[in-house]
Image (tube, rainbow, N blue to C red):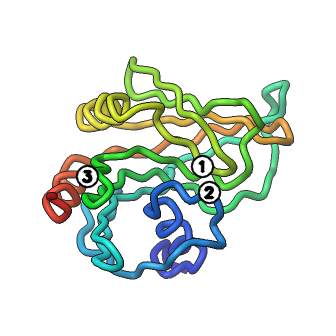
């Protein structure tokens, strides 16, 4: 099944674009894919309020136990987003859907080249701490080749998801243009 035909994928797209709603069951669906550039896809919704987002899924995923041994686990959709919602003054907000509940009081580590960032977690989603961090991360993504996110599940599994940044800059520019306030 294609990534963009998956109902779970569409629910998570709506979920992350819906201003931080932490419950995927409250998510909306979107099939309005308006652009794609290599490994990144752009979506736009105009109602109830205009919002645009770009999204990618990982090229590589590694799940390990606390000793670092590979571990087979079941995860939901794993997706990295940048969201624009002009009516809420949201511009280039980073979020990561890990496909599992993160360990309470943990963080997700994001590495782009030599730069490291910490994302705060709520349920199955992680976000940058501030809008300034969002800007720094987006700028690093424009210059980078890949982004690696490492998190820990409530069950202790360490996950490492690597996303290609090929097509990121063009997709980000498209989303920003479509949702210019």
Q: Work out how far the residue at label 3 is from the one at label 2, CA to CA, in angstroms.
A: 28 Å
Specify the farthest residue to the top. 114
Along the line of sight, the residue nearer the viewer: 8 or 176: 176
Q: Is residue 41 above or below residue 140?
A: below
Give the percent coordinates (x, y) of residue 98: 62, 49
Q: Which callout, 1 or 3, points to the residue nearer the camera?
A: 1
> Which mark is first along the chain, 2 or 1?
2
What residue is pinned by disc 2?
22
Report if the CB atoms under discs 1 and 3 are less than 8 Å apart: no
Is 89 on the left or on the right of 146, as rendered? left
Quarter of the rendering occupied by the N terminus: bottom right
Along the line of sight, the residue nearer the viewer: 172 or 165: 172
* Residue at point 56%, 43% (across, down): 126
* Residue at point 35%, 35% (across, down): 131
> Which mark is first along the chain, 2 or 3?
2
Q: Work out how far the residue at label 1 is from the one at label 3, CA to CA, in angstroms.
A: 23 Å
* Residue at point 60%, 74% (across, down): 8
Q: Looking at the rendering, which quadrant does residue 154 occupy?
A: top right
Give the crowd class for mark 2: few <14, some 14-19, many >=20 residues within 10 Å: some
Quarter of the rendering occupied by the C terminus: bottom left
Q: Secondary structure at mark 2?
A: loop
Report if the CB atoms under discs 1 and 2 are less than 8 Å apart: yes
* Residue at point 84%, 28% (across, down): 66
What residue is pinned by disc 3?
167
Q: Looking at the rendering, which quadrant does residue 99 occupy?
A: bottom right
Q: Work out how far the residue at label 1 is from the one at label 2, CA to CA, in angstroms.
A: 7 Å
What residue is pinned by disc 1?
125
Is 167 on the left or on the right of 164, as rendered? left
- Number of labels in the image equals 3
Q: Which callout, 1 or 2, points to the residue nearer the camera?
A: 2
């Amino acid at each position: 099944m294609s990534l963009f035909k998956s109902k779970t994928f569409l629910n998570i797209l709506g979920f992350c674009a819906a201003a931080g709603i932490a419950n995927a069951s409250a998510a909306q669906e979107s099939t309005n894919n308006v652009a794609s550039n290599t490994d990144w896809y752009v979506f736009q919704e105009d109602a109830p309020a205009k919002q645009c987002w770009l999204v990618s899924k990982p090229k590589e995923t590694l799940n390990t136990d606390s000793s670092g041994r590979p571990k087979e686990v079941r995860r939901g959709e794993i997706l990295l987003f940048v969201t624009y919602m002009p009516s809420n003054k949201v511009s280039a907000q980073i979020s990561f859907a890990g496909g599992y509940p993160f360990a309470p009081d943990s963080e997700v580590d994001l590495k782009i080249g030599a730069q490291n960032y910490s994302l705060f977690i709520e349920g199955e989603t992680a976000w940058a701490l501030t809008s300034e961090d969002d800007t720094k991360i987006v700028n690093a993504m424009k210059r980078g080749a890949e982004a690696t996110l490492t998190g820990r599940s409530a069950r202790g599994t360490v996950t490492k998801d690597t996303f290609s940044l090929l097509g990121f800059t063009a997709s980000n520019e498209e989303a920003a243009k479509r949702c210019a306030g």
